[in-house]
Image: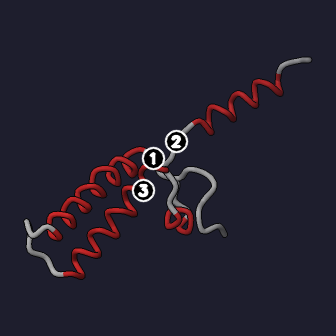
Amino acid sequence: MELIPSEKNVGGWDRTVRLVVGPILLIVAAAALLGVVTLGPVVIAASALVGLVLTVTGAVQKCTLNSLLGLNTYRGATEEQAEQEIERTERPA
């Protein structure tokens, strides 16, 4: 089992949520560090860490936890590539 999945497994609504919630958590952590919002150090660290992970996994579309749980919300070119491969093998030479 790979630590970083080689194939994309984050897409659709999953990616959208990650790319919205992640930066929001990073902004909250930054605001707390600047004193705009009052939060405890553990909450700031957790917000920054979770925000960073969500943002990065949403951007690269690869998530180790999804891979470990067998989840795949990515619907990319893989189906299209499979159809092209079938068409290529069915054509006479």
Q: Which x, y percent locates residue 52?
A: 36, 62
Structural crowding at the residue carrying mark 2, measured as other residues with C-alpha within 10 Å and reported as few (<14), some (14–19) or many (≥20): few
What is the count of numbered marks? Answer: 3
Residue at 89 percent across and 17 percent down: it is 92
**Residue nearest the observer in this picture, 24 or 74:** 24
Residue at 60 percent across and 59 percent down: it is 5
Question: In front: mark 3 or mark 1?
Answer: 3
Structural crowding at the residue carrying mark 3, measured as other residues with C-alpha within 10 Å and reported as few (<14), some (14–19) or many (≥20): some
Which is nearer the N-term, disc 3 or disc 1? 1
Q: Amino acid at mark 1?
A: Gly
**Residue nearest the observer in this picture, 18 or 44:** 44
Residue at 21 percent across and 81 percent down: it is 41
Which is nearer the N-term, disc 1 or disc 2? 1
Q: CA distance from mark 1 to mark 2?
A: 7 Å
Q: Which mark is residue 11?
A: 1
Q: Say which residue label 2 marks.
A: 75
Which is nearer the N-term, disc 2 or disc 3? 3
Residue at 39 percent across and 49 percent down: it is 15
As helix, strand or loop, the secondary structure at mark 2 comes to: loop
Q: Which x, y percent locates residue 57?
A: 44, 56
Q: Above or below — where is 11 with respect to 46?
A: above
Labelled pair 2, 3 in contact (Cβ < 8 Å): no
Q: Say which residue label 3 marks.
A: 56
Q: Residue furthest front?
A: 34
Q: Above or below — where is 29 with respect to 11?
A: below
Q: Amino acid at mark 3?
A: Val
Q: How is the image coloured?
A: secondary structure
Q: Amino acid at mark 2?
A: Arg
